[in-house]
Image (cartoon, rainbow, N blue to C red):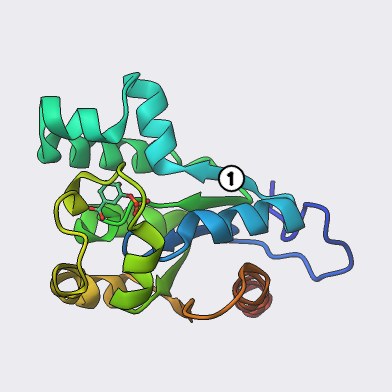
Amino acid sequence: MPAHWPCGKEKGRKPMHVKNNIFLIGFMGAGKSTIARYLHRKYGMEWLEMDKEIERKQGMPISEIFRLKGEEYFRELETELLLSLEEKEHTVVSCGGGVPLRSCNVEAMKKSGIIVFLTARPETILERVKDSHDRPLLEGHKDVEYIAELLAGRQKKYEAAAEFLAATDGRSAEEIGEEIYRHVGEIGEKQA
Ligand code: S3P
């Protein structure tokens, strides 16, 4: 049975036959959850928040998984979760910031959807994450220099993984969400 795009609330657009999931990647605080929520509400896409799903399955917060089992264990959980999403359709996945660092994760995402890289300047990221304490990699490092360095080390992998890049600095969720949805629709039309 072909998958159709869009099949949510939005009517009157051409259906898309393949790749109808969207994987949002990018650094912590890039706005992945915000944009995923927008696409969920506006277009009725199923919304999967990787961190929340992992927390639900493990019965503890990410910070506890890092503390008790270590980062490598958490990375295995991310890969396991991605591989289990093969059958998903019309789903927007808000990925953890480290997901594109493993090539097997990127392969798994490419098989079932379009990867969109949300970018943000280190200053913007700091502003967005400064008051939260649920990201173990940033605890004790809430400064622009640290964020810029970690981001620089990941940038190439984010760019290599993504088919589409959307800047988020100073833009509303609506602007970004519409840009992504339009772009994904265009890809679908070319493939149909
Ligand atoms: C991480 C990002 C976090 C979370 C974990 C590790 C990372 O998710 O998966 O703390 O390595 O960048 P968000 O990007 O949703 O904050």
Badge 1 density bin: few <14, some 14–19, many ≥20, Cα 10 Å: many
What type is the residue that disc 1 sits on? Answer: Trp
Which element type, helix, strand or loop, lies under badge 1?
Answer: strand
Q: Residue furthest front?
A: 131
Please give the name of the residue rendered at 30% of the width and 43% of the height, measured from the top-left corner: 133
Q: In front: 129, or 66?
A: 129
Residue 41 rendering spot, x and y as whole percentages: 72, 52
Q: Residue furthest right?
A: 12
Left or right of 129, for residue 93: right
- Image quadrant containing the C terminus: bottom right
Please give the name of the residue rendered at 49% of the width and 51% of the height, measured from the top-left corner: 93
Task: Give the quadrant of residue 81.
Answer: top left
Check mark 1 vs ligand 1: CB closer than 8 Å? yes or no: no
Residue 97 in sight: yes
* Up/down of 168 relative to 110, above or below: below
- Residue where numbered disc 1 is placed: 47
Q: In front: 96, or 150?
A: 150
Task: Give the quadrant of residue 43.
Answer: bottom right
Left or right of 121, for residue 32: right
Left or right of 98, for residue 128: right
Residue 102 rendering spot, x and y as whole percentages: 20, 56
Residue 113 in sight: no
Residue 130 rendering spot, x and y as whole percentages: 33, 58
Left or right of 139, for residue 105: right
Q: How many numbered circles are shown?
A: 1
Q: Residue furthest top?
A: 59
Residue 5 rendering spot, x and y as whole percentages: 72, 60
Please give the name of the residue rendered at 29% of the width and 71% of the height, measured from the top-left corner: 158
Q: In front: 72, or 81?
A: 72
